[in-house]
Image (cartoon, rainbow, N blue to C red):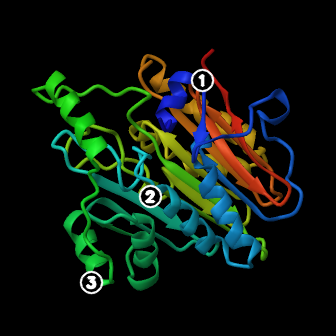
Amino acid sequence: MKITRRDFVKTGALVSGGLMANQLSPSNIFGRQPVDGKLIAVATWGGTIKSTEKAFEYLKAGKNSLDALEAGIRVAEDDPTNTSVGYGGLPDEDGIVTLDASIMDWNGNAGSVGCIEGIKNPISVAKLVMHRTKHVMLVGGGAKKFALENGFKEENLLTESSRKTWEEWRKKNPHGVYRVDEKNHDTIGLLAIDNSNNLSGGVSTSGMAWKLHGRVGDSPIIGAGMFVDNEFGGAVATGNGEFVMRTVGSFLVVEKMRDGLSPQEACEYAIKRIYKTAKNNRDIQIGYVAINKKGEYGAFSLYDGFTYALTTEKESKVMKSEFLVK
C-alpha cells in the first residue's frame, strides 16, 4: 500500500515511490547551514523528494531555476497517489477537482491560475500566463479556456480512489458539513537556485479537500503561498491557506530575510505572527520553507508533523521541521 503525505502526519512514516526515504535523525532535522555549491532544490513535505530530485536533474544539466522547478512540480501533479496535488487530488464538496498554482522567476515575473478544472498541470499553465499574457492570474473557466487554447488537453482529474474517498465523506456529511484538519489540506511548494545563482519558486495544489466549490487558497496568491526576491531569497507555504493569506506569509518571510534574519528565523517569525490569531484553532497546520541566496535554508510549522525535502550536489534527504506549539 502506498503511503501519502497525509498518512505521514498520522504515522510518522514516509514512503516515496515504494522506497523508504532517508531516516530522520538529529543530524539532518534542521537546516541552518549553507549547502555545498550553489545548486539547490527544496520543497514542502518529504513526500516530494522525487520532485526536488527531478528539479536538480535540470539544474545539473544547466537549465534555469524556473524550468527546473516546473519539471519538479509536474512530478507531483502527475502522481495519482498524491491526493493533494494535480491528478488524483481530493475534490471539493461537489466532487469536483479544482487546482491552484503559481510560479515566479528571478526577475520578479509571476503567473498563476486559480480554481482551474480539467487540466493536469496547472504549474505549466501558470508559467504560460506569465510568459504569454500581461496578466498575473487567470481563474476558473477563463484559466481553462486559456490552457486549452495553448495546447493543453482536458482530462478527468478525479481518480477512482479519490472518488470513493469523496463518496465516503459525503455519506457521513450529507449536508456538506465541512471541517478543516491537518489531513485535508496540503501543497507542493518548490524553490530552486541555478548555475547563474538565480532563484525561482512555484507552488501547486488541489487545495482543501471538501472545500466549498470556487474556494481559492493561498497558493496562487503571489506573496501568500509563494514569493521570490532574487536579491535576498524565497519562501513557500503549505497548510491552511486562509491564515497564510491573512498574513501575506511568504512575502513576510522574505521581507524578514531582507531585514537580516536567516531563513530559519524568518520562517519562525512568520509562524509566530500567524499564531497570534490562530492559537485557538487546533485543527489547522501551516508550514513554511525558505532559502536565501547563500544557499541557507530553513523550515518551521505551527504544529508537529511537517517535513520537507532537499536535494543538492552532495545529498538528497527528507528533514523534519521544528514547530511552535509543543
Q: Secondary structure at mark 3?
A: helix
Q: Which amino acid type is shown beneath numbered disc 2?
A: Glu
Give the vertical position of 32 relative to 320 (above or below).
below
Quadrant in which the C terminus is drawn: top right
| Residue drawn at x 74%, y 31% as measured from the top left | 24
Is 281 left, or right, of 256 in this rendering? left
Q: Which of the 4 quarters of the picture holds residue 186?
A: top left
Q: Position of residue 209 (x, y in %)?
A: 31, 38
- Give the distance between the C-alpha atoms of the residues marked 2 and 3, in whole angstroms: 21 Å
| Residue drawn at x 44%, y 18% as measured from the top left | 282
Q: Which amino acid type is shown beneath numbered disc 3?
A: Glu
- Earlier-in-chain disc, 1 versus 2: 2
Q: Which of the 4 quarters of the picture holds residue 71?
A: bottom right
- Give the distance between the C-alpha atoms of the residues marked 1 and 2, in whole angstroms: 25 Å
Is 23 left, or right, of 103 in this rendering? right
Pointer 2 local density, CA inside 10 Å: few below 14, some 14–19, many at least 20: many
Q: Which residue is mark 3?
A: 149
Q: Which residue is mark 1?
A: 304
Q: Secondary structure at mark 2?
A: helix
Residue 315 seen in the current view: yes
Disc 1 to disc 2: CB gap under 8 Å: no
Residue 198 seen in the current view: no
Disc 2 to disc 3: CB gap under 8 Å: no
| Residue drawn at x 60%, y 25% as measured from the top left | 12
Front residue of 75 and 29: 75
Numbered circle sitting on residue 77:
2
